[in-house]
Image (tube, rainbow, N blue to C red):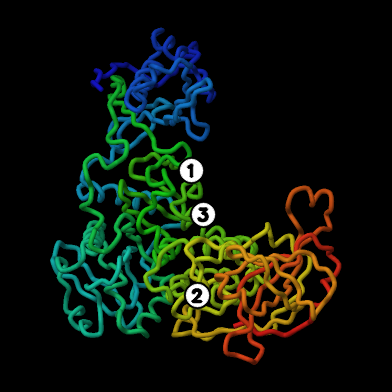
Amino acid sequence: METSPLLQISSLSTLANDCESCRNRLDRKSIGLQVLSQSAKSGCASCSVLHRVVFEVLDCRFPAWTEIKADLVVAFQANSSLSIILRQSGERKIPSLQFAIYTRYGHPQSASPFVRIGRDCSGPRRDAYSDVCKDWIGNCELSHSRCRKGPTTLPGRILDVGFHEDNLIRLRVFEAPQKGYYTALSHCWGGLIQCRTTKGNYSERLDGISVSSLPQSFQDAVTVTRSLEVRYLWIDALCIIQDDIDDWETISGDMAAIYRNAYLVIGADMSENCHEGFLNSWEPGKYPTGPGKPVAYITDEKATLYWRTLQHEFKPCSVFADRHRRQKIAERVWTFQEHLLSTRMIHFADTELVWECECIVLCECMEIDPKDTPSGNSIDFRGGMDGFRQWLQSSMDNKFSMWSCIVDAVMGKSITYEQDILPALSGIVGEFQRSGAGPYLAGIWLNDYPQSLFWSAGGSGISDQRPVAYRAPTWSWASIKSDRPLCKYSFGWSQHRILKTYAKIIAASCTPKGKDPLGAVTDGFMEVVGPLLQVRCIEFVGGSATLVADSELTSSSLNPIRGFFDLPESRVSSKNVFCLYIGSWKYLYGVFMKVRPRISAHSGLLLIASEGLNDGKYERVGIFVEGLVSTEGLPSGVVETVVTII
């Protein structure tokens, strides 16, 4: 497409009162392309600019638009006066084309209400990142009292990177608490890191570490830290003695404080491993829309106007444009925790930088409106760090609902060592306990009983299995190795719809594997008293089956019982299966709640006798629901029993 000469316009500061297009624009009403063309021909300056941009967008993004006979309309996005969506009227549809008209940040601006400010992310990152980061940090320190940071307690072991371009950094150890500022790196290991601190090289680390010997992501973290004039940097691979299990357990249990107290967390979001780096990866044209295209020059304001297409109608920044196109760091469990625990973080994503603090989310290209709340532009989870802290301060029901979302998120992420699943969440668990969530055992909150036990593997059970290394008792979701999120409130269950609880926890305990009481466990049990019914499995399909009561226990007809198993059929079909009735819940499907409000569902845990044990111990293998039953009483044949689930 040939570049047209810039429109020369004296002013856009006042919209023409007698211009229909301008009036519609201010009222957020759509306007037809023909109306816009007439307004431009009539001499309206703002409509002339918009008309030029509309035609350039069409020619650039949809060259065949002239073949479409139906009219085209320009619609103004409801949540931003600065975003315009192009749609086609009529039966035939074309994808909406969203674009913005803007002036470049740091250059003369326009007072026009439909011109925003933006950056072009089209140059080498190493040349531009520092000014952007300092600008964000300065604004946060000045404007956000919640985020403002004075000197905080430094981690007991940390890297001293100095303030100069020296090739040597040192591992510092503080015997007594020290105050200061430090950054922390959040990154994907991508397998075993050779450059790590061990018992064998610990003394050498204290003497000094050559920056050039570090993996590229570590080198970039040193560069960013020095550019911000911060002296200290925390990197897990270098600040934890990796082959000292006691040291690892001690520091991993302190992750919440390390990331919460950091002056800034540096997120190597785009890097799959520590060798890829995040400062030298810019490629020309990598930003999906490329640099903005100049369209007009406003002589009174000395401002040049540009346009560019946006990436998504509701989450415009390219980082959020496609939830399936996730950054590498978002795929890992450890970095998920680091993200939520941070109070201020800069994400070095593949196309641009993204700022996140407790008050706001911003992107380098400035497509995200600063007036938007963080929860509207979540990078990964419920508004990121801000949403996390807001939910911690809300009701107990909301806390545990958020925990369910955290578990779902974690089950869909990767972890190098599967036995690390609970340690990788211990920092988050600590934040929950500080907010009053109460007793916690291996992924389960006792104050959330009975809901906390009603997690489900989704009823497939085909690919799920127990981890090779022991992770948790079978009543915990952590005992299942699954490649998809779990369902906590299956069948529409909700904390506010429990009718009656039948079973009671008598005792429960887990044995910590190491020093962190919220981390890995070696064993655990839950002793429960409640109604127990022995059943047989028939019609096993995938991970679910119809269950019928043993004829020796009862001859009465029962309502259909459907079991949803955590494990493949071969693990449970030949076993004696028991239904432990936990409670009854309102039935939520269809018109039943309106026509028959007393209809409910009994539900509980599916158990089998633990292999090799004859002392009354059981393993959980799933959940069941006995639907459309009277709320009065349980079926005949159940026996009040004390069971120990391991």
With respect to residue 152, does 43 lie above or below? above
C-alpha separation, residue under disc 2 versus residue under disc 3? 29 Å
What's the residue at 22%, 72% (across, down)?
A: 195
Which kind of residue does numbered mark 1 sit on? Asp
With respect to residue 468, does 117 lie above or below? above
- Measured from the top left, where is residue 74 in percent x and y? 47, 22
Residues marked 1 and 2 touching at CB (< 8 Å): no
Total number of numbered labels? 3
Q: Which structural element holds mark 1?
A: loop
- Measured from the top left, where is residue 319 in percent x and y? 38, 47
- Measured from the top left, where is residue 456 in percent x and y? 60, 65
Q: Using a 10 Å C-alpha cutoff, classify the residue at mark 3 as few (fewer than 14 neighbours), some (14 to 19) or many (20 or more).
A: some
- Residue under circle 1? 372
Q: Please name which of the two marks, 1 or 3, marks the residue nearer to the observer.
A: 3
Q: Please name which of the two marks, 2 or 3, marks the residue nearer to the observer.
A: 2
With respect to residue 639, does 499 lie above or below? above
Q: Using a 10 Å C-alpha cutoff, classify the residue at mark 2 as few (fewer than 14 neighbours), some (14 to 19) or many (20 or more).
A: some
What's the residue at 42%, 29% (across, down)?
A: 97
- Residue under circle 3? 382
Q: Which structural element holds mark 2?
A: loop
Q: Which structural element holds mark 3?
A: loop
What's the residue at 36%, 53% (across, down)?
A: 327
Q: Is residue 226 visible?
A: no
Give the quadrant of residue 14.
top left
Find residue 466 and name its label. Answer: 2
Which kind of residue does numbered mark 3 sit on? Arg
> Foreground residue, 612 or 430?
612
Q: Please name which of the two marks, 1 or 2, marks the residue nearer to the observer.
A: 2
Quadrant for the C terminus in the image: bottom right
Residues marked 1 and 3 touching at CB (< 8 Å): no
Quadrant for the N terminus in the image: top left
First in sequence, mark 1 or 3: give its number: 1
